[in-house]
Image (tube, rainbow, N blue to C red):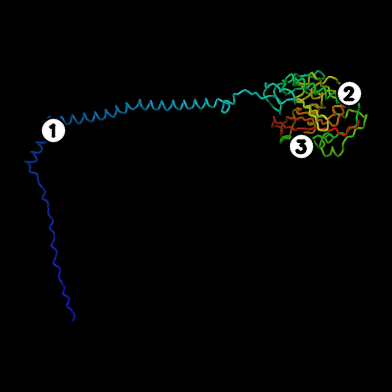
Amino acid sequence: MKKDKIKKEKAPKAKKEKKVKEKKVQTPEEKLAFEAAVKSFTSSGVFKALVVLFVCSLVFTMFSSSILRLTAIPGALRTRAAAIQANINAQNNKNNNNSGFGGLGQIFQPDTTSASIDVQGTTAAPTTQAPTTQAQNTTTTKAPETTASSGTSTETEEATTTTTTAPTTTEPLTDSPAMIKEKKTMLNTYKKVVNTANATKPGFTKVQYRTMEKDSNAKLVLKDVEKNYPGYFISQGDAEAAPIVAAKFSDMTLFLIENENYACLLSDKNASEAIRKVEKVAQSDGSTKLTIVLRNEENPAITPADEKTPLSHTSAVFPVLDKEDIKTKLVARQGLLTSITDVNLLYHDCTLEIVYMPKTGKIVSATQTIQYDCIVDYTALFFISGQQAVGTVTDTAVYTDFVY
């Protein structure tokens, strides 16, 4: 049987009644009484005392904070001054530490480097010398100028028709007494050996070649110089393929300098002034190799073949060229884009090397190396003046196969 569902009816909720606050209304009598009380309080001494106390406390607070700030200023200034002084002290210490060889003080240290002209077996040259300048192993100290041919003076810069120029040596001249003696001995040995060869007139084979190395400007100014003078410039390979053979008892003008009577015209009293370095080394076969290197010289004057007194140190030992002759030749063949204004020749590292038998004095071989910088001053494109080009010429002559 189905049970009958009995629906229960919920009792209705009772509504909450809102309580309404009654606003208290002040009666005129109460208002008058309150105003009278306030007026009585503000006019009383207690209120005035409270006001004065509040104002005083406010002023005291402001004054106190100002005092604190004022008293803090000296301390801050002292702290700042201490920091600045500490920074200054640190900088001074740093500068003092840098005053030695490891810091900026290196700039002010004296230069004590010596000239590289030591001789084997002798004492070294003194360390005092002039400061280094333009070319390798050169200094600003000049050698005494010798007399130029035909009365030419190097101090007359306006002369342009001279054929020779007095030499300007650009090497230091300070040697120790032992080194001076060694140079004189080596020079006299060289002259004795070569003069003996000139007297006996042995046969020999000569291979001579000349090349030029150019800087970037010289590749423009001197680009065709080898082609223009093929009789002067010759490669080592071409020279070795066609050597010069001098028969026995033939003319010795083909040997070293063009003077068959003298090995060189350099006097031993000028050995220190003209020679930078000498070296003597014994070889394993019993021979001795003697090497002489001259000091650098600018525009050395040419010494004529019949002259016994040299007009320059370099021409006393080596054949040299005249700067005016070179200038004339280069100007005659200059390009359209350049105009040559001057030419100077700086001879440097010119070396003599002979191998000989000390018992007999006979030469086994000889090598003569001449180097000079051809320094060309020019104007480019007809308006860019002050340009310079450098071509370094190396002239090597090798003498072998001596027949006695």
Can residue 118 be seen in this snapshot? yes
Relative to 94, 251 lies left or right: right
The amino acid at mark 3 is Lys
Labelled disc at residue 261: 2
For mark 3, what is the residue? 223
**Of helix, strand and loop, which one carries label 2?**
loop
Give the mark, 3 or 1, whose residue is nearer the N terminus.
1
Disc 2 to disc 3, how far (Cα)? Answer: 39 Å
Is mark 2 in CB contact (under 8 Å) with mark 1? no
Q: Residues within 10 Å of mark 2 (few under 14, many from 20)?
A: some
Labelled disc at residue 248: none
Residue 148 image-quadrant placement: top right
Q: Residue furthest right?
A: 249
Image quadrant holding the N terminus, namely: bottom left
Q: Residue furthest bottom?
A: 1
For mark 1, what is the residue? 42
How far across and down, in percent of the image, does residue 30 sit?
7, 41
Residue 11 image-quadrant placement: bottom left
Disc 3 to disc 1, how far (Cα)? Answer: 116 Å
Which residue appears at 13% of the width and 61% of the height?
Answer: 15
How far across and down, in percent of the image, does residue 167 sit?
77, 22
Q: Residues within 10 Å of mark 1 (few under 14, many from 20)?
A: few
Which residue appears at 82% of the width and 27% of the height?
Answer: 318
Disc 2 to disc 1, how far (Cα)? Answer: 141 Å
Which residue appears at 76% of the width and 29% of the height?
Answer: 349
The amino acid at mark 1 is Thr
The amino acid at mark 2 is Asn
Image quadrant holding the C terminus, namely: top right
How far across and down, in percent of the image, does residue 213 sit?
75, 35
